[in-house]
């Protein structure tokens, strides 16, 4: 979310991209390897380009009713695995982050 590093990835994209990449929202950037970071960036670029039409922001392009995978879906079943979507607040502004605890496993730091 640091806009001085990469700009344009807002709160909705944050939740959606982490879900699509199977990354738990509390994962430290330092534990992601270069391939994972590049994949995150590529996914962000792809989704932002696909949404340049000024229509409703969409990250799910299968034509079904839900246009987002996790954002705003707290308490509803994950569209991939059926686990209940959770929401937690993070960062200085306590911004909401939505995620599936089954698809996005928490990394244990030892
Ligand atoms: Zn899931």
Image: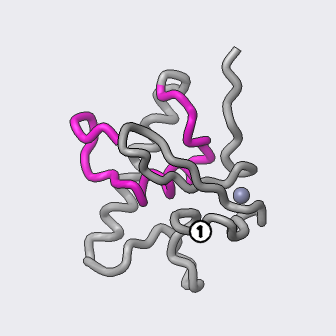
Label 1 Cα neighbours within 10 Å, binned few <14 / some 14-19 / many ≥20? some
Viewer-nearest residue: 59 or 98: 98
Quarter location, residue 91:
top left
Magenta-drawn stretch contains 25: yes
Identify the element where label 1 is drawn. Answer: loop
Q: Main secondary structure of the magenta part?
A: loop
- Quadrant the N terminus occupies: top left
* x 32%, y 81%: residue: 55
Look at 39% across and 61% down and name the residue there.
47
Query: Residue at (67%, 54%) from the top-left corner?
Result: 100
Does label 1 point to a residue whose CB lies under 8 Å from ligand 1?
no
Q: Which residues are magenta?
A: 1-29
User: What percent of the width, then of the height, locates residue 60?
Assistant: 52, 71
Callout count: 1
Q: Quadrant of the C terminus?
A: top right
In terms of image quarters, where does ligand 1 lie? bottom right
Residue at 40% in and 48% down: 42
Classify 54 as above or below 4. below
| Residue position marked by numbered label 1 in the rendering | 73
Q: Position of residue 95 (x, y in %)?
A: 42, 50
Q: Nearer the viewer, residue 62 or 84?
A: 84
Residue 79 shown left or right of residue 43 in the figure = right
């Amino acid at each position: 979310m640091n806009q001085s590093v990469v700009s344009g990835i807002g709160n909705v994209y944050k939740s959606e991209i982490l879900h699509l990449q199977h990354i738990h929202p509390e994962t430290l950037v330092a534990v992601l390897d270069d391939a994972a970071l590049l994949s995150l960036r590529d996914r962000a670029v792809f989704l932002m380009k696909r949404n340049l039409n000024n229509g409703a922001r969409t990250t799910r392009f299968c034509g079904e009713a839900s246009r987002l995978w996790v954002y705003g879906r707290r308490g509803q079943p994950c569209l991939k695995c059926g686990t209940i979507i959770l929401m937690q607040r993070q960062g200085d502004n306590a911004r909401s982050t939505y995620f599936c605890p089954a698809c996005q496993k928490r990394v244990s730091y030892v």
